Image (cartoon, rainbow, N blue to C red):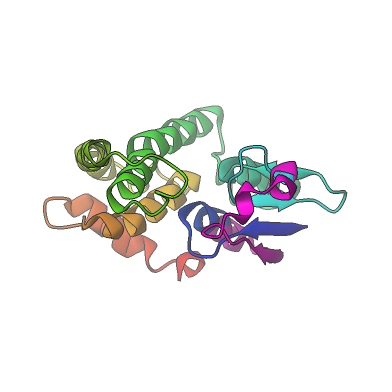
């Protein structure tokens, strides 16, 4: 197997942390996304969405979308981590919070950054107002996440899960939007300090 990605990007970080949690180490191939390599016909043969990361299996089969890659790795690698949940209820709760972190946190964060920074203005139409609105939506979501972590030790409940990995990546990306974890988010700060001690994110 090999992982086509760009080191340091949020989606690549999610898969990398997941791999470390499973104790896996696979070959990686850097993709020049700033240079547009992911937009080439050859890359789109591997990833119809034109995005990284992409997991290429030994038989040439390719899987794109970071969560789909994580699900495949989890299902094909013997482990007792249960990063997608143990019981039916846990699995539903992990899915619920993973979706919330993704749609109410990461997506607005990415939209805010791309539209405010204009980093890809050579290939997409950037709208400053949408970037500001997206940043505002992200700020509105943080107290929701903080409240949940005031009730549970981890994002989806009693156990560490893929939802925590996504939330960790979100918190790291927020710095690009000049957003920080302060005393108004005490539970999120406590969780973040706890996460920072995990080997997989260091």
Of 85 and 162, the residue lying toward us: 162
Of 118 and 199, the residue lying toward us: 118
Residue 61, compared with residue 30, is above or below; it is above
Q: Position of residue 29 (x, y in %)?
A: 68, 64
x 48%, y 47%: residue? 161
Quarter of the rendering occupied by the N terminus: bottom right
User: Dividing the picture into quarters, in which one does residue 189 lie?
Assistant: bottom left
- 60 left or right, relative to 154: right
Of 200 and 91, the residue lying toward us: 200
- 36 left or right, relative to 167: right
User: Dividing the picture into quarters, in which one does residue 62 lie?
Assistant: top right
Q: Residue extending furthest right?
A: 59
Residue 106, compared with residue 172, is above or below; it is above
Would you say residue 75 is visible in this rendering?
no
Quarter of the rendering occupied by the C terminus: bottom left
Would you say residue 194 is visible in this rendering?
yes
Q: Position of residue 145 (x, y in %)?
A: 27, 41
Q: Is residue 19 magenta?
A: yes
Q: Position of residue 123 (x, y in %)?
A: 47, 45
Q: Position of residue 170 (x, y in %)?
A: 36, 51
x 11%, y 51%: residue? 184
User: Dividing the picture into quarters, in which one does residue 171 lie?
Assistant: bottom left
Q: Which residues are magenta?
A: 16-45
x 85%, y 54%: residue? 58
Residue 41, compared with residue 169, is above or below; it is above
Q: Residue extending furthest front?
A: 122
């Amino acid at each position: 197997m090999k992982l086509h990605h760009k080191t340091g990007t949020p989606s690549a970080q999610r898969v990398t942390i997941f791999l470390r949690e499973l104790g896996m180490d696979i070959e990686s191939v850097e993709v020049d996304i700033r240079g547009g390599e992911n937009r080439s016909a050859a890359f789109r043969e591997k990833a119809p969405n034109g995005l990284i990361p992409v997991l290429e299996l030994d038989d040439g089969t390719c899987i794109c979308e970071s969560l789909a890659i994580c699900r495949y790795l989890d299902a094909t690698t013997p482990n007792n981590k249960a990063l997608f949940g143990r019981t039916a209820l846990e699995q539903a709760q992990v899915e619920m919070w993973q979706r919330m972190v993704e749609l109410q946190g990461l997506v607005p964060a990415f939209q805010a950054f791309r539209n405010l920074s204009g980093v890809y203005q050579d290939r997409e139409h950037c709208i400053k107002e949408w970037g500001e609105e997206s940043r505002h939506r992200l700020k509105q979501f943080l107290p929701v996440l903080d409240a949940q972590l005031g009730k549970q030790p981890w994002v989806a409940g009693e156990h560490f899960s893929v939802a925590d990995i996504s939330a960790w990546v979100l918190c790291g990306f927020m710095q690009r939007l000049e957003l920080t974890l302060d005393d108004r988010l005490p539970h999120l700060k406590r969780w973040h300090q706890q996460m920072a001690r995990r080997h997989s994110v260091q």
